Amino acid sequence: MQVPRRRRRLAIAGVAVAALAATGLTFASANQALAEEGCKVDYKVVSSWGGGFQANVTITAQEAINGWDIEWTFPSGTSVSSAWNVSHSQSGTTFRGSDVGWNGSIASGQSREVFGFIGSGSSATPTQFKINGDLCNGTTQPPTSEPPTSEDPGNPGGGDKVDNPYTGAQVYVNPQWSDRAAAEPGGDAIADEPTGVWLDRTSAIYGNSSPTTGSMGLEDHLDEAVAQGADVIQIVIYNLPGRDCAALASNGELGATEIAEYKNEYIDPIVDIMSQSKYADLKIVNVIEIDSLPNLVTNVSPRATAVANCDTMKANGNYVDGVSYATAELGALPNTYNYIDAGHHGWIGWGDTNPQYDNFFAAAELFGSLIGENGMTADDVHGFISNTANYSALEEPYWAVNQNVGGQALNQNPNLPWVDWNDFNNEKDFTEAMRDELIANGFNDDIGMLIDTSRNGWGGDYRPTGTSTSTNPVTFVDESRIDQRYQKGNWCNQAGAGLGERPQADPEPWIDAYVWIKPPGESDGASEEIPNDEGKGFDEMCDPDYGGNIRNGNNPSGARDDMPLSGHWSSEQFQELLENAYPPVN
């Protein structure tokens, strides 16, 4: 999918180089060179423009490699301007690179994309490569695999995946959510909207009759989707070890070290069910592990916002291990479409050359580091999703984040808490820029974005109808913004929120769809501690009386009162979302 991109200048140093990698003339040029007996190097130019190019490097090993050094000679005048996932140097035209630890192991028979870079000069492929000092001179034999049996349908449906699974598609309506919505006054107006099916515990795969997921298991939902004649069903993969390390309300059942249980008892059975031939014509959209990876950027030491649980998950690597495993295993199926969670602009919208303050570039680089882990490739990722189960505005129609008010750009004003130096004020601009940065970090240039608009409408009596006339920056923003939260990091049961745009395909060239992944009416977390057997703790951010912490700028939580456990139904919240919907519900 080649899409036109409206460029916006980010108020961030260093974005120009990264942006070049995702714009201009794009093409794929793969060239292979053979390494010491049984090894191979693929040097793939993925995009090129006047005077520059982006390339990715893949190593294939017949015998296992534990740590690699690579060397080649560029054409005269060519150099590397930036690179990721490699420790590198260049002397004259000679490039040398080494693994960075986590990407140093390549199993026998495995092909692993190990790093990428931005180059200036000629994009011609070097004539020879060395790995660990040995000149390329051998061949590889691909690993053999058993032919599919009657219980292993292999490639049900076959063929290539479509560019956008939502285009022209009928999307599955979860009857359990639909029945609850229709039972609410006025709820029948939206009860036929498609929402995500959440697999938030291993037992949810099979149906556990809980208030969260009900009696229907994954196979029940897939069967119902086929019966509805649906083209697409949306499944939320959400059970990482040490899940949601910075938010107790959505902690899960698996402890921080239970990665084997996650792979063997959770992901593998999901793959087995989805691979059945009876679902060959059903496009399965998987939303992969919300609220996980960005925590490894924003909530770890040495930052003041660090949380001990997040330090643990960064140290043990199980978020990266789990997400890459899930994406690789699910991505191998011919009818699945994986969208990895990318946070939202109010979480990772800050970019900076100082790592202490950079969330944006660091998050994209972290996502890129998944490539090669557990055999995951860029092809296993169809796109990314923002604002999952959150409240960030789709767009702010009455003010721009870099607008000059009171003699200074709003996002450069140190006395403006709502903006707080953020480079974005809405999800549309954020997803467009994040998409470009993801491509610069190794993902395919046809990835699409999803935005969860289930609760970011912000209609009702408090919605502004025009731009403020105030020259005071704080007053100007407060009177112009449609997002009415105390702080854009507030995430739990936000009072005053409303339904957002109804689900729709292709709303913008870079956006595959607006979706309702969070079913409206389901709680984000309990307002007070409630004993339960679901592994869900009490988070003060769900307490309406809580005054905040460093992660939300010490602002009030803005949460609704009298809310049940996360995933449980709240009639009061549903009614408020319906009343404050924007566009309004007829």
Image (tube, rainbow, N blue to C red):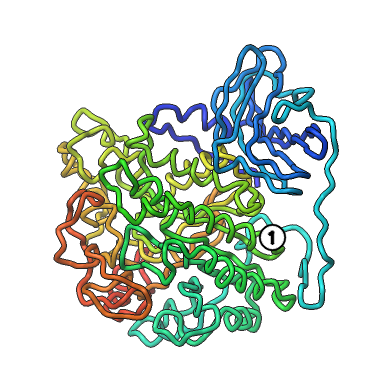
Identify the residue position indicated by label 1 in the image.
Answer: 332
Residue 460 seen in render: no
Which residue is rendered at x = 64% and y = 61% of the image? 329
Q: Residue 397: x percent and y percent?
A: 34, 48
Q: Specify whether 585 is left or right of 497.
A: right
Which part of the image, by quadrant, shows the C terminus? bottom left
Q: Residue 106: x percent and y percent?
A: 67, 44
Which residue is rendered at x = 54% and y = 69% of the image? 235
Q: Residue 345: x percent and y percent?
A: 38, 48
- Mark 1 element type: loop
Which residue is rendered at x = 78% and y = 37% of the image? 40
In this orientation, which residue lies closer to the viewer: 486 or 74? 74
Q: Amino acid at mark 1?
A: Ala
Q: Residue 373: x percent and y percent?
A: 60, 49
Q: Specify whether 385 is left or right of 554.
A: right
Graded by Cα atoms within 10 Å as few (under 14), some (14 to 19) or many (20 or more), the crowding at tag 1 reads some
| Relative to 128, residue 26 above or below | below
Q: Quadrant of residue 562?
A: bottom left
| Relative to 586, residue 257 above or below | above
Q: Specify whether 418 is left or right of 187.
A: left
In this orientation, which residue lies closer to the viewer: 138 or 275? 138
Q: Specify whether 264 is left or right of 487.
A: right
Q: Quadrant of residue 406?
A: top left
Residue 491 seen in render: yes
> Total of numbered circles in the picture?
1
